[in-house]
Amino acid sequence: MPKTSSRLLALLSLLQTHRDWSGDALAERLDVTVRTVRRDIDRLRELGYPIHTAKGPAGGYRLGAGAQLPPLLFDDGQAVALALALQTAAADGSVGEDASRAVATLRQVMPTRLRHRVDALQVTAVHPAGTHTATTADPQLLLALGEIIRAREELRFDYQRAAGTSAPPRRAQPHHLLTWRGKWYLLAWDLDREEWRTFRADRISVRTPNGPRFTPRPLPNDDVSAFITGRFRGTDGTTADWPCRGEAILHLSAHAVAPFTPDGIVEELGPNRCRVILGSWSWTGLAATLGRYDTEFDDVSPPQLATAFALLAERYARAAQANTSTS
């Protein structure tokens, strides 16, 4: 028979699966008697867990929601995922203070092996206007990258291009992990290209062993958020993911356009003129997006965007003509 403490944890883990358990089923799973199960249930209740009893020949138990939050049981994977989510939330101004306190509380009860790994994971969440973060990356990969960043060791990795093809092995000095528009990125100094680069975390496959230790070089302006925002939304591209980027001058004020342009750049040119830089998956899609502002515009570039406007104009004209002929 397992020790009482281990058995209580095992019992609590079973009860947290959100189902009714009979006393016989619990006794069988724990390899104890039904009487022992009843005693253990009473011990958990004394610790503050609201365990409800169901009537019946064999009886039954369910872990309910209590008025107070009792101690919680997480396995290693759940603890890491929770710490990761809380670190991301801590960078959000709306719940940042509460999330930071929650990280500190969780850290206090973590085993040492997990505490060191979570401490190595420092997250910067960069939230463009009008977006929400919904990260999709392997927590183990993020922890590994966090450890390499903290150790200040060169990262050796394989990187999958957007088209799905693999690039030659890469070498970089990792600087920071961050989120942008729901994706995780690694900010690093690319040793082969000798420039700052951002890499999609879900396309990284870490090679072992790591490279030698290095002294981190200063980031331009020493501001991760400002640097990434400028890199993804600067004049060299609206975002790193858009294959088509173009611009036009709208006959509207920047103040009027900016609230409706969370994915682009708005440059004020005068009381009723502003330059808009946008990205899209296609040139016709970009042309349609610019058309939504319902105003005159000029100085369209590049030529592919102007061609897309002509194509859309022909389509719209045919649609209007067809509608007129049938009415």
Image (cartoon, rainbow, N blue to C red):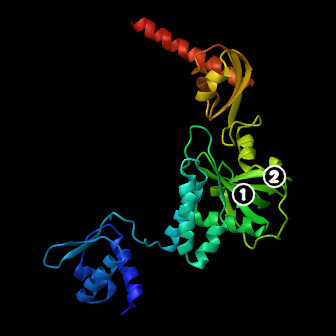
Q: Quadrant of residue 309?
A: top right
Location of the N terminus by quadrant is bottom left
Question: Residue 260: percent from the left, percent from the top?
Answer: 58, 28
Label 1 to label 2, Cα distance in Å?
10 Å
Residue depicted at x 64% and y 73%? 116
Q: Which mark is residue 219?
A: 2
Q: Which mark is residue 268?
A: none
Residue depicted at x 61% and y 34%? 262
> What is the crowding at mark 1: few (fewer than 14 residues within 10 Å), some, or many (at least 20)?
some
Residue depicted at x 72% and y 57%? 176
Which residue ends up furthest to the bottom in the rendered image? 1
Determine the secondary structure under disc 2: loop
Question: Residue 109: percent from the left, percent from the top?
Answer: 53, 74
Q: Quadrant of residue 64?
A: bottom left
**Residue identified by numbered label 1:** 176
| Towards the viewer: 55 or 238 | 55
Are the two marked residues, 1 and 2, in contact with CB atoms closer than 8 angstroms?
Answer: yes
Q: Please state which amino acid type lies under the numbered disc 2.
A: Leu
| Depicted 49 relative to depicted 103: above or below | below
Location of the C terminus by quadrant is top left
Q: Is residue 323 left or right of residue 213?
A: left
Question: Residue 231: percent from the left, percent from the top?
Answer: 74, 43
